[in-house]
Amino acid sequence: MAYNAKGIQIKIAGAWKRSAPIAVLPTVMVLLSVLMHLFPGVPAFVPIALYAATFFSVLAFTIYDYVHKVTHDMSYALCCPLSLSIFMNLFLSGIAHEISNSIAALLLSSNILYAFVVAAVAACIELSHRGGSQIGNRIVALLCVLMGYAVLLYILHPSTITSFVSTLRNLITPFCFFLLGAVLAERVTLDSFCDLVIALGFLVIAFGFVECFVFPDFWVKANIHDLWGLKGIKIPVSQPPSNFYSSETINGVHMRRMASLFADPVNLGAFLFCVFMAAWYRRRWFMVVLAVVSCALTVSKGALLGFLVWIFLYFLITSENVWVKRAALFSVFAIGIGFLGFSAVSSTGSVAAHMRGALGGLESIINNPFGYGCGNVGVLASLANNHAMRGVEESGFGVIAGEVGIIGVAVYAIFFIVTLRSGLEARDKRVKIMACTLLLAIFANIMFNEVALSPNSCGVYFSLLGVMLGDSLPHDEPEIRGAHFARSDW
């Protein structure tokens, strides 16, 4: 037995055994992908129907488990969306030549659909029985305001349904996943959730090394040409996407980036930094080293930004020496400025594009303070809407400002302030470092990268934050936390 922060006993001993639902969906997806590659004549509706049946079965099991098994660990429910993010591109690669981009967009939204439904059901039950938690109720209110305003703007500024759904999915992702973690917080122990993230991270890293060094043309042979075509991105038949190579050059050569099962180095880098944080929190030092090395192989700017945030916060929170804190701040700025300088002379302009996108968001607010509506702004919208604005691409902040204007920016600002205050109030230093690092790192990435709003990038960040800052707050009174959360040793 273990205890969550409210003193409720959780049957953590069976957590690994009860994590089977995490493996169900990936197993089915891999088998269906292999089937479609071996027998390309099989109609696409067959694997889609089998996947849908499996998905809704796991979803129904999760809801049943939440309602009836009130003392069992449910960490698996937080990792099911993550497993969908990891394996979805592999599944789609087998049917990409037969399906439309709208079907692909629907399947790619499986992770956010799972998170939204489970979070909504659990939140309704909590509200009806106990009134819900303070932070959970605030997130529900913010989510309702954001979705309501997005629908209103869609009526006023209509776009294609595919572009609207795709961009709305990204817009609500941080709130849905945070709420999922918050409402399940009393049914989850942070240690077990971190352990599952680490296990999935090891699987992704292992495949990444094989994909990067043994079979570098894996995704080319797996039909990434048609897969990326569904997303509106045209690439040569015999070559991987351009983002498989770094924008910076070393000795005049663009480095091949690890893509692993994500088939996207950007999403992979975001996930691997989260694996690093989970491994650091759990003191899994082998995985800490492996995650750092893998982040380097993805050449991930987002991961580098996260490491800089972690270094500064670690010394700021743990050190009593003001000079150590100043040295940490100076080092972080020096590394950051050094990288910007290196990128300026060796890059194809990636960093500059991200910065222009953020500035474009400010210009968008000045030009239209109330927003142009979901599906009308940014790179993702332009893939399904030829009339979408392209002045704010490469920036999550730019897309938020352009789509939902000052209302959306205000909602995100309140969300950030509420969660940051909760993180800073944590009494456990290790929890405080982890929560604040994840929050600042992902919001910094969102500021300069539109992809950071994707469920594949930020979903696991906000699920972890929901668990840490939701009902099972690690900064509650220590006498009711139980030994499972007692961490005074460094």
Image: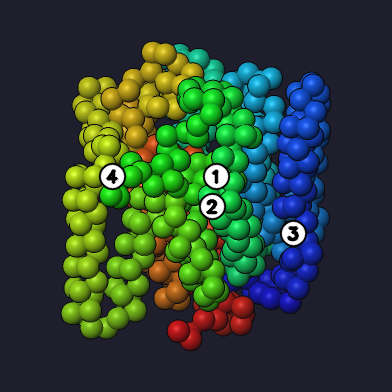
Q: Residue at x 18, y 67 (%)?
A: 330
**Which amino acid does the dot numbered 3 rest on?**
Ser
**Whole-percent x and y of residue 43?**
79, 21
Q: Which residue is the site of mark 1?
A: 216
**Which amino acid does the dot numbered 2 rest on?**
Phe
Q: Which residue is the site of mark 3?
A: 19
Residue 3, relative to residue 158: is it above or below? Answer: below
Q: Which residue is the site of mark 2?
A: 213
Quick one: SS at disc 4? loop
Q: Are marks 4 and 3 in contact (CB under 8 Å)?
A: no
Q: CA distance from mark 2 to mark 4?
A: 20 Å
Q: CA distance from mark 4 to mark 1?
A: 20 Å
Residue 480, relative to residue 360: is it above or below? Answer: below
Q: Residues within 10 Å of mark 1 (few under 14, many from 20)?
A: some
Residue 373, relative to residue 414: is it above or below? Answer: above
Tag 1 or tag 4, which sits nearer the N-term? 1
Tag 3 or tag 4, which sits nearer the N-term? 3
Q: Which residue is the site of mark 4?
A: 252
Nearer the observer, disc 4 or disc 3?
4
Q: CA distance from mark 4 to mark 3?
A: 46 Å
Look at the image and tell me in which quarter the C terminus lies: bottom left
Q: Quadrant of residue 245?
A: top left
Q: Residue at x 50, y 41 (%)?
A: 264
- Residue 183 seen in render: no
**Which amino acid does the dot numbered 4 rest on?**
Gly
Q: Are marks 2 and 1 in contact (CB under 8 Å)?
A: yes
Q: CA distance from mark 2 to mark 1?
A: 6 Å
Q: Residues within 10 Å of mark 4 (few under 14, many from 20)?
A: few
For this rendering, which residue is in front, 138 or 13? 13
Q: Residues within 10 Å of mark 3 (few under 14, many from 20)?
A: some
